[in-house]
Image: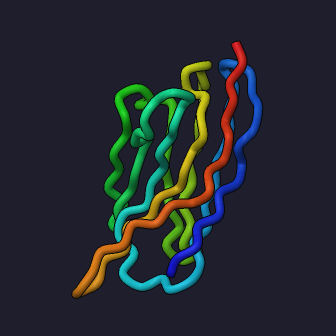
Amino acid sequence: QVHLVESGGGLVQAGGSLRLSCAASGSLFGIDTMGWYRQAPGKQRELVADITGGGRTTYADSVKGRFTISRDNAKNAVYLQMSSLKPEDTGVYYCNLLQRSLYTTNNYWGQGTQVTVSS
Protein backbone atom coordinates (compact mmCIF):
# COMPACT_ATOMS: atom_id res chain seq x y z
CA GLN A 1 0.00 0.00 0.00
CA VAL A 2 1.02 3.56 -0.72
CA HIS A 3 -0.15 6.58 1.26
CA LEU A 4 -0.16 10.04 -0.31
CA VAL A 5 -0.38 13.25 1.70
CA GLU A 6 -0.94 16.58 -0.02
CA SER A 7 -0.30 20.03 1.41
CA GLY A 8 -0.15 23.62 0.24
CA GLY A 9 -3.70 24.39 -0.80
CA GLY A 10 -5.54 27.49 0.30
CA LEU A 11 -7.26 30.70 -0.69
CA VAL A 12 -5.49 33.08 -3.05
CA GLN A 13 -6.46 36.05 -5.17
CA ALA A 14 -6.45 35.85 -8.93
CA GLY A 15 -2.95 36.36 -10.26
CA GLY A 16 -1.40 34.86 -7.17
CA SER A 17 0.66 31.73 -6.65
CA LEU A 18 0.50 28.53 -4.64
CA ARG A 19 2.76 25.52 -4.34
CA LEU A 20 1.30 22.08 -3.73
CA SER A 21 3.34 19.24 -2.31
CA CYS A 22 2.64 15.54 -2.15
CA ALA A 23 4.68 13.03 -0.18
CA ALA A 24 4.40 9.30 -0.72
CA SER A 25 5.02 6.67 1.93
CA GLY A 26 4.55 2.96 2.32
CA SER A 27 5.51 0.23 -0.13
CA LEU A 28 7.30 2.40 -2.65
CA PHE A 29 8.53 -0.03 -5.25
CA GLY A 30 7.98 0.42 -8.96
CA ILE A 31 6.84 4.05 -8.78
CA ASP A 32 6.07 5.22 -12.30
CA THR A 33 4.15 8.41 -13.05
CA MET A 34 3.16 10.91 -10.37
CA GLY A 35 0.78 13.73 -11.02
CA TRP A 36 -1.93 16.15 -10.04
CA TYR A 37 -5.60 16.07 -10.91
CA ARG A 38 -8.33 18.50 -9.93
CA GLN A 39 -12.05 18.43 -9.56
CA ALA A 40 -14.20 21.54 -9.65
CA PRO A 41 -17.73 21.52 -8.23
CA GLY A 42 -20.09 19.76 -10.60
CA LYS A 43 -17.29 18.68 -12.93
CA GLN A 44 -15.32 15.52 -13.52
CA ARG A 45 -11.84 15.04 -12.19
CA GLU A 46 -9.29 16.12 -14.78
CA LEU A 47 -5.56 15.82 -15.26
CA VAL A 48 -3.64 18.98 -14.43
CA ALA A 49 -0.09 17.70 -14.92
CA ASP A 50 1.94 14.58 -14.50
CA ILE A 51 5.60 13.57 -14.59
CA THR A 52 7.28 10.25 -15.27
CA GLY A 53 10.18 8.83 -13.32
CA GLY A 54 12.42 10.01 -16.12
CA GLY A 55 11.11 13.55 -15.89
CA ARG A 56 8.83 13.70 -18.92
CA THR A 57 5.93 16.05 -18.20
CA THR A 58 2.39 16.44 -19.48
CA TYR A 59 0.18 19.46 -18.85
CA ALA A 60 -3.44 20.29 -19.45
CA ASP A 61 -3.73 23.00 -22.09
CA SER A 62 -5.45 25.26 -19.58
CA VAL A 63 -2.40 25.39 -17.29
CA LYS A 64 0.49 25.38 -19.77
CA GLY A 65 2.84 28.25 -19.11
CA ARG A 66 1.38 28.89 -15.66
CA PHE A 67 1.92 25.64 -13.72
CA THR A 68 5.12 23.66 -13.29
CA ILE A 69 5.28 20.09 -12.02
CA SER A 70 8.44 18.71 -10.48
CA ARG A 71 9.49 15.60 -8.67
CA ASP A 72 12.07 14.53 -6.11
CA ASN A 73 12.59 10.81 -6.55
CA ALA A 74 14.83 10.61 -3.47
CA LYS A 75 12.01 11.96 -1.32
CA ASN A 76 9.22 10.23 -3.24
CA ALA A 77 7.54 13.59 -3.60
CA VAL A 78 5.87 15.58 -6.34
CA TYR A 79 5.21 19.29 -6.44
CA LEU A 80 2.99 21.65 -8.39
CA GLN A 81 3.99 25.30 -8.62
CA MET A 82 0.93 27.28 -9.68
CA SER A 83 1.29 30.87 -10.86
CA SER A 84 -1.01 33.42 -12.45
CA LEU A 85 -3.91 31.63 -10.86
CA LYS A 86 -7.40 32.16 -12.23
CA PRO A 87 -10.81 31.63 -10.60
CA GLU A 88 -11.34 28.68 -12.93
CA ASP A 89 -8.39 26.94 -11.27
CA THR A 90 -10.54 26.54 -8.17
CA GLY A 91 -11.13 22.96 -7.10
CA VAL A 92 -9.89 20.07 -5.04
CA TYR A 93 -6.44 19.01 -6.16
CA TYR A 94 -5.54 15.34 -5.84
CA CYS A 95 -2.12 13.78 -5.94
CA ASN A 96 -1.85 10.59 -7.99
CA LEU A 97 0.77 7.86 -8.13
CA LEU A 98 1.01 4.98 -10.57
CA GLN A 99 2.89 1.93 -9.34
CA ARG A 100 3.94 -0.85 -11.69
CA SER A 101 5.36 -4.27 -10.95
CA LEU A 102 5.83 -7.40 -12.99
CA TYR A 103 2.35 -8.63 -12.07
CA THR A 104 0.22 -5.63 -11.29
CA THR A 105 -0.42 -1.92 -11.72
CA ASN A 106 -1.76 0.13 -8.83
CA ASN A 107 -3.22 3.62 -8.93
CA TYR A 108 -3.18 5.62 -5.69
CA TRP A 109 -4.85 8.90 -4.73
CA GLY A 110 -4.32 11.40 -1.96
CA GLN A 111 -7.18 12.83 0.07
CA GLY A 112 -7.16 16.10 -1.84
CA THR A 113 -6.36 19.69 -0.98
CA GLN A 114 -8.67 22.62 -1.67
CA VAL A 115 -7.49 25.46 -3.88
CA THR A 116 -9.74 28.50 -4.07
CA VAL A 117 -8.93 31.43 -6.33
CA SER A 118 -10.96 34.56 -5.74
CA SER A 119 -11.59 37.15 -8.45
| Quarter containing the C terminus | top right
Task: Please report the residue visible at 53 percent of the width from the left and 67 percent of the height from the top.
Answer: 72
Residue at 42% from the left image edge and 45% from the top image edge: 49
> Which of the 4 image quadrants contains residue 87?
top right
Q: Position of residue 109 (x, y in %)?
A: 51, 61
Query: Residue 59 appears at what percent x and percent y?
Result: 37, 40
Is residue 43 shown above or below 112? Answer: above
Which residue appears at 39% of the width and 56% of the height?
A: 51
From this view, report whether residue 14 is shown above or below residue 106.
above
Left of 39 or right of it: where is 92?
right
Taking depth in this image into account, of 13 and 37 the one nearest to the observer is 37
The percent coordinates of residue 25 (x first, y second) are 59, 78
* Front-most of residues 104 and 21: 104
Residue under the point 36% across and 81% down: 30
- Look at the picture and state if 117 lies above or below 35: above
Which sits in the foreground, 107 or 74? 107
